Amino acid sequence: MGGALRLIGTALSRTRRGGKLTVLIYHRALPKPDPLLPGEPDARVFGWQMEVVAKHFRVLPLGEAIERLTAGELPVRSAAITFDDGYADNHTVALPILRKVGLPATFFVATGYTDGGRMWNDTVIEAVRVAETGTLDLRALDLGTLPIGDVPSRRRVIDTLIGAWKYRAPAERDSLARQLTDLIGKPVRSDLMMTSEQIAMSSRAGVEIGAHTVTHSLLVKLDDAAARREIEESRAALRTLTGREVRVFAYPNGKPGTDYTQRDVQLTRELGFTGAVTTAWGAGTPGSDPYQVPRFTPWDRAPTRFVLRLLQNYTRTDARRV
């Protein structure tokens, strides 16, 4: 494996397609593996991933990278590292690793969940985590009864609930998640997200803090006034917490045309952000829209495949836009 990794790394290091930007998306860096969150790296995995990125890329703060990309002044093999939503382990687990390796990063924070809040999807996950083994009776939520016991069955329940509710209106999603916790009847964790002090401390430690709306609402579901309010209020809250300008924005969920529209692109431009990021795969080029910079999730848990994924994304430029 070591020989293959060196060969792939050499190929990536010799790629000469200057001015391209690869942006990595993370949500969490867990203290230890969690079978209910198989897509999230733990500290060990995140640590070696950052070492690989540091070895093969010039990592820049996202705002700076977007400005240099737009100006055609981006160094070869540039990258940025981003975290979405504002989880506490961004500060407690990821930040110490980033500082050890010497890499900058951007934390996009949905400000409505700081200081003990919880996103609706996390309410679902944590409620299912503590549910009694047996049959989960969700007829009151029009989802029938679902078997629940081992990890695979709990994952199926989580996927069913999130899939059924993901594109509901924000207030309806929150209400359904609360009804789920009432049905399960057990306390659910409320320490998943960063506190105000952790956000401020991360900023003081050099992390770029970006806006991610207040309630992580899918902008496509909001009218013009509500969409503007979500973006503006998120940025204002973060500016107050950090004492710094908030230059970058991440569209919640981030799929072009599905989760946000051209109206929202125009909003971020009008509101004076340096740029905004999506979840469309690919690498940014000087011709990319700075308000629709693509990103990708490096989910591989083996170093060779991880580097292959980086190489694949770096050479891909056909990211979707609205």
Image: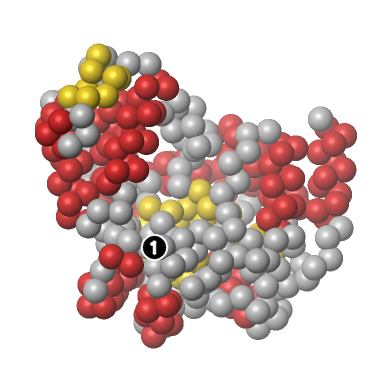
> Residue drawn 86% across and 49% down?
10
How busy is the neighbourhood of tag 1: few (under 14 within 10 Å), some, or many (20 plus)? Answer: some
Q: Can I make out residue 83 in this image?
A: yes
Q: Nearer the viewer, residue 198 or 5?
A: 5
Q: Which residue is mark 1?
A: 259
Percent position of residue 141, x then y: 16, 37
Percent position of residue 232, x then y: 29, 74
Percent position of residue 47, x then y: 61, 38
Amino acid of disc 1: Asp
Q: Can I make out residue 80 in this image?
A: no
- The answer to whether residue 147 is left or right of residue 142 is right
Q: Nearer the viewer, residue 188 or 265?
A: 265
Q: Is residue 282 above or below residue 49?
A: below
- The answer to whether residue 111 is left or right of residue 38 is left
> Residue drawn 70% across and 81% down?
72
Dividing the picture into quadrants, the one containing residue 282 is bottom right
Q: Is residue 199 above or below residue 92?
A: below
